[in-house]
């Protein structure tokens, strides 16, 4: 009769988890000689608790194939997740953020960055979606600068100017990847070697970019670099955000911690002036809707077809500090940006037009925004701006954090 009465924990051993618990229970009995003295049902309950603790969600990284480039290089995609369910997908093709899923005030997760479903979309991308921008983010006037008495000529890919590193850019390179995870987060480390003369820049440059998705719902980006010749460097990430998941970003509430911005000429090259934001459409010191003043009759807004400017952050040079905050009223999602950089480029997606993105979505004008932490545009030609020169033997380091939360 006893053989017919099976313990309840053996009724469903087809379940993987129950099978693991059963095996764990048997091992504990052998280890401690437990048999008659502890009822099996109590042993089962205790081991269930141990199993839950052992298998609870932890930060992790998964790797998968993402296709091949036009010259046959294999590309991978990495999925970083934390215990709260926040997820970032990043590829080693240009270090691009492919998707970033964040919870809204009701706990619903949505992808809050623009992009494409597959590698082919990124191979033909004209918007720099989600990429690591370098060797120099933003513009350099007429594609020229002088360093140590020598003039260097760069690729011109924005009219007469050099933009975001030229043609063979960091966001179009296949980076080497290494992953890890610990109690603090899921980590993707990318490295790239930019050869002397690449796009006209001097010096062999070794670059490292580390993405960490933390348990505090932060996507942290640590950049570092070293060179064997004096050069210039300015790195950022070009993710386009939409905290509603889709639709216009004009009702997003933006705050920027800056008393000044750098006005530009008609082709978006800074004049060298640091202009007060007070009593201008560029005053975001107190949060306001992105669309509130974007179409006002302001010369700077006309030059950029809206906001596409660098703000001078209120800070001590090199310190990690608050730069900007965006709130989406309906979902309650909040994005905060912290950085060691002296500036931030706010771009309101003014030139997005009929771009086919993820899930067949059509990305239209002002349906995504960028907050690109950086040194100022054209700094190599503006001695009054913070320097972007990296000398031989020096180490470049920069950190930016995208922190997500909700307003309930």
Image (spheres, rainbow, N blue to C red):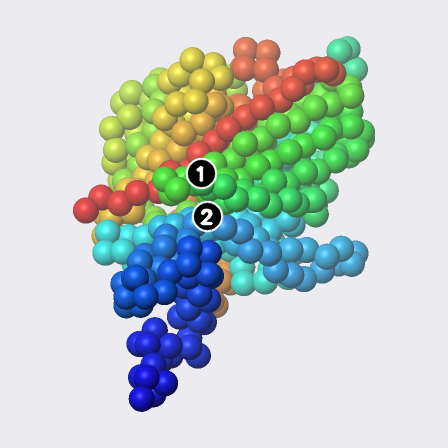
Total labels: the figure holds 2
Left/right of residue 112 with respect to residue 106 in the rendered view: right
Choose between 34 and 364: the one closer to the eye.
Answer: 34
- Is residue 283 depicted above or below 188 in this figure? above
Q: Position of residue 288 (x, y in %)?
A: 25, 36
Element under disc 2: loop
Q: Earlier in the sequence, mark 1 or mark 2?
A: 2
Q: Residues within 10 Å of mark 1 (few under 14, many from 20)?
A: some
Which residue occupies 77% across, 10% down?
149
- Is residue 182 depicted above or below 268 in this figure? below
Q: Which residue is mark 2?
A: 59
Where is residue 396, by image quadrant? top right
| Mark sitting on residue 384 | none
Where is residue 152, by image quadrant? top right
Which residue occupies 73% across, 23% down?
227
**Does residue 81 appear in this view?**
yes
Choose between 186 and 117: the one closer to the eye.
Answer: 186
Distance in Å between CA atoms under marks 1 and 2: 8 Å
Element under disc 1: loop
Which residue occupies 52% across, 44% down?
181
Q: Position of residue 72 (x, y in %)?
A: 78, 58
Choose between 319 and 178: the one closer to the eye.
Answer: 178
- Is residue 253 depicted above or below 22 in this figure? above
Q: Position of residue 352 (x, y in %)?
A: 48, 51
**Does residue 219 appear in this view?**
no
Which residue occupies 78% across, 28% down?
204
The answer to whether the residues at label 1 and label 2 have Cβ atoms under 8 Å apart is yes
Q: Position of residue 113 (x, y in %)?
A: 44, 51
Q: Residues within 10 Å of mark 2 (few under 14, many from 20)?
A: many
Q: Which residue is mark 1?
A: 184
Q: Quadrant of the N terminus?
A: bottom left
């Amino acid at each position: 009769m006893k053989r017919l009465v099976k313990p309840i924990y053996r009724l469903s051993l087809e379940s993987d988890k129950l099978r693991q618990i059963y095996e764990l229970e048997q091992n504990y009995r052998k280890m401690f000689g437990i048999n008659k003295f502890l009822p099996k049902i109590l042993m089962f309950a205790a081991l269930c608790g141990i199993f839950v603790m052992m298998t609870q969600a932890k930060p992790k990284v998964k790797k998968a194939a993402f296709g091949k480039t036009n010259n046959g290089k294999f590309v991978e995609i990495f999925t970083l997740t934390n215990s709260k369910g926040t997820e970032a997908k990043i590829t080693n093709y240009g270090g691009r953020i492919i998707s970033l899923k964040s919870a809204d005030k009701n706990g619903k997760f949505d992808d809050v960055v623009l992009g494409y479903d597959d590698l082919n979309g990124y191979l033909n991308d004209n918007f720099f979606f989600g990429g690591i921008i370098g060797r120099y983010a933003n513009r350099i006037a007429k594609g020229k600068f002088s360093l140590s008495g020598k003039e260097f000529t760069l690729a011109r890919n924005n009219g007469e100017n050099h933009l975001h590193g030229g043609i063979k850019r960091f966001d179009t390179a296949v980076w080497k990847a290494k992953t890890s995870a610990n109690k603090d987060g899921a980590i993707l480390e990318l490295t790239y070697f930019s050869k002397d003369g690449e796009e006209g820049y001097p010096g062999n440059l070794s670059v490292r970019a580390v993405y960490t998705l933390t348990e505090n719902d932060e996507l942290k980006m640590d950049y570092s670099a070293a060179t064997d010749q004096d050069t210039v460097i300015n790195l950022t990430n070009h993710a386009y955000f939409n905290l509603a998941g889709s639709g216009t970003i004009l009702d997003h509430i933006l705050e920027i911690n800056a008393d000044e911005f750098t006005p530009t000429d008609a082709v978006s090259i800074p004049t060298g002036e640091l202009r007060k934001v007070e009593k201008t459409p560029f005053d975001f010191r107190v949060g306001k809707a992105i669309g509130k003043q974007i179409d006002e009759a302001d010369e700077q807004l006309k030059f950029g077809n809206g906001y596409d400017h660098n703000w001078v952050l209120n800070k001590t040079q090199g310190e990690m500090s608050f730069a900007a905050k965006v709130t989406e009223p309906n979902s309650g999602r909040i994005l905060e940006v912290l950085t060691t950089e002296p500036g931030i480029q706010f771009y309101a997606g003014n030139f997005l037009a009929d771009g086919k993105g993820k899930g067949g979505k059509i990305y239209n004008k002002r349906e995504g925004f960028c907050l690109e932490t950086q040194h100022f545009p054209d700094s190599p030609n503006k001695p009054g701006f913070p320097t972007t020169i990296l000398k031989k033997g020096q180490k470049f380091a920069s950190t930016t954090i995208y922190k997500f939360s909700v307003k309930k």
